[in-house]
Image: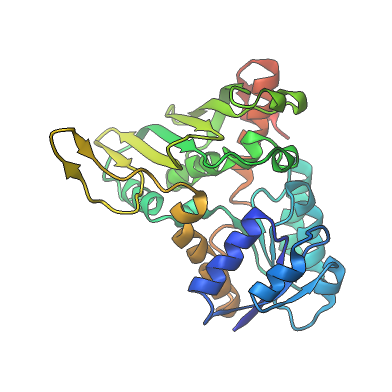
Amino acid sequence: MINIALVGIGRIGLVHAHTIKTKLSSEVNLSLFVDSMSKDLENKAKEYNTKYSRSFDECLNDKTIDAVLLCTPTNTHTESCIKALKSGKHVFCEKPIATNIEDHLKVIEASRKSDKKLMVGFNRRFDHNYKNIKERIDTGEIGKVQMIKLTNYDSPFPNVEFLKTSGGIYLDLCIHDLDLISFLTDKNGDEPVELFTWGSAFLMPELAEFGDVDTAIVSVKMKSGAIANINTTRFANYGYDQRAEVLGTKGNLESRNDTPTNVILQNEIGVIGDKPFYTFLDRYENAYAEEIKQFVESIINDKDVPVNAQDCLPALKMALAANISLKENRIVKIDEIK
């Protein structure tokens, strides 16, 4: 049994708390909630029958805690990762672990010097659809990858206060898809070489006041010549739309939306089926459970984590390149990002 402290009980933190309680309670003891800001800390601790603290340092000094789940705002991740590793805790950190390359490399170095595990929370890698696509790409079933098309339409619309500290649409939302591009092509040694994006604050014009957008397209050219396209928005009114298509020289793979049921009604009106799940919690509940399960197994069995800090460096570079492309309206070479 691994004793874990949940640091940050905001939206994603409570996703992990729910997942651990409902799916991993036999393997994980959620023993402490830590949050310096939340007004709901005591109530949530009671709901999950756990201790609570306002102090991250107090958490790190607690010898009964084996690992921390860092679910705090993006701009706190680098410092928190390094402090936790130095204190002797295993670390699971929500993506991204940094908002610039210098800080990301600091975390890589801290992880290298530590004998504790550091895993980054890119949950799409653990989703049954994306895993199946990757396995079939890696076995050569569709030949060489020619084109990747990813759809990531969020739901519901996040609140403005969250968006102000999220790092922006590319570092917060699109980074999942940018990581998928690396994940799906890494066995073949492919890598991104240049990127261009279009974006607009179409749904919430006030996002433009802090340089963010809510609707975007990202196009990435790979070293092999393959092209990857991401269509994304902060809100689709019909639900959480998550689709993928990969065209290869020998075939095409497509994953459609998961839905509450696969039952179809056919009558004189038309053919009617379920809408996609409405939120990311419903859609990726099993993926969240699987990533924490594998993190815990890495600790227990002293094996490499499935997603380390080095693995997700390409996604950060692409996200930062997208920020520049949006601001300067130009194609950005990935090797510009240092």
| Point 52% across, 68% down: residue | 294
Left or right: 60 as drawn, with respect to 280:
right
Answer whether residue 208 is visible to the viewer in this image. yes
Q: Residue at x 44, y 41 (%)?
A: 239
Q: Quadrant of residue 44?
A: bottom right
Q: Does residue 189 appear anywhere in the picture?
A: no
Seen from this angle, which residue lies furthest front?
A: 268
Please tell me whether residue 123 is drawn above or below residue 174 in the rendered image.
below
Q: Is residue 221 left or right of residue 7?
A: left
| The image quarter in which residue 165 lies | top right
Q: Position of residue 298 (x, y in %)?
A: 56, 72
At a point 28% along the width and 32% down the height, the residue shown is: 249
Q: Position of residue 262 (x, y in %)?
A: 26, 51
- Residue 70: image quadrant is bottom right
Residue at 79 percent of width and 52 percent of height: 76
Looking at the image, which is closer to me, 97 or 112? 97
The single residue placed furthest to the top in the displayed view is: 329
Decide: is 175 above or below 27: above
Q: How is the image coloured?
A: rainbow
Compared to residue 113, the image places residue 301 above or below, namely below
